[in-house]
Image (cartoon, rainbow, N blue to C red):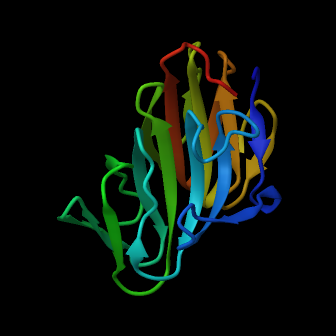
Amino acid sequence: MTGSQVLRAHDRSVSRWKNGGGLTREVAADASGAGMEDFVWRVSLADIARSGPFSSFAGVDRIITVVDGAGMELIVDGVPHTVADAYEPFSFRGDAVTDCRLLAGPTVDLNVMTRRTRATAHVRMAREGFSVVPRTGVLVLVIALTGTVGVKESGVTLDRFDAVLFSDHDAGTLRVDGVAAVVTVTTASGSPGT
């Protein structure tokens, strides 16, 4: 893919988790048609309505970030981790046995998954303006979590959960009025795979 792509929240379809235990809305993934077993990278927003096990993803690394609700306790391979603070990314192996206990009702989380041998990801939160210029093999996905995000070059404004995807040296200057997630994905092949 060349250039930036705006991804509106209202255009996303809702699907069930791999194990049927919740709902997810895919924000972006490495290629259209990539299934749950063959993606290189995938970013989604998940609704967790009740406690229970997470789906297992062999060979996948995950980063989860609470964006709405009181959060959860994740038990990853028997070790408990409290994931309660909004906008604080937590990394774990997707093939670990993971169980979720909601702390105080439903929550929404940002879920970033990468195939371990083919891509890596980093998630940070932005609360002020910044610029993006991805190198070859790197893409940057910016998601508005609260308030709005403006893209100077196109004049586009992102509302809650809207996103913009940059790759292939496509520069962008962003204004953040609230909180935005900045997901950087680097692929092992040197191609974003989109």
Farthest residue toward the bottom?
A: 104
For image coordinates 77% across by 30% down, the residue present is: 153
Residue 74 seen in the figure: yes
For image coordinates 61% across by 49% down, the residue present is: 143
Farthest residue toward the left?
A: 79
Please tell me whether residue 72 is drawn above or below residue 170 in the rendered image. Answer: below
For image coordinates 70% across by 54% down, the residue present is: 162
Residue 5 in the figure: left or right of residue 63 = right
Residue 52: x %, y % from top left: 40, 76
Please tell me whether residue 64 is drawn above or below residue 134 in the rendered image. Answer: below
Residue 176 seen in the figure: no
Quarter of the image with the C terminus is top right
For image coordinates 69% across by 64% down, the residue present is: 15
Residue 176: x %, y % from top left: 59, 48
Q: Which is more toward the observer, 78 or 191?
A: 78
Residue 56 in the figure: left or right of residue 45 = left
Residue 59 in the figure: left or right of residue 13 = left
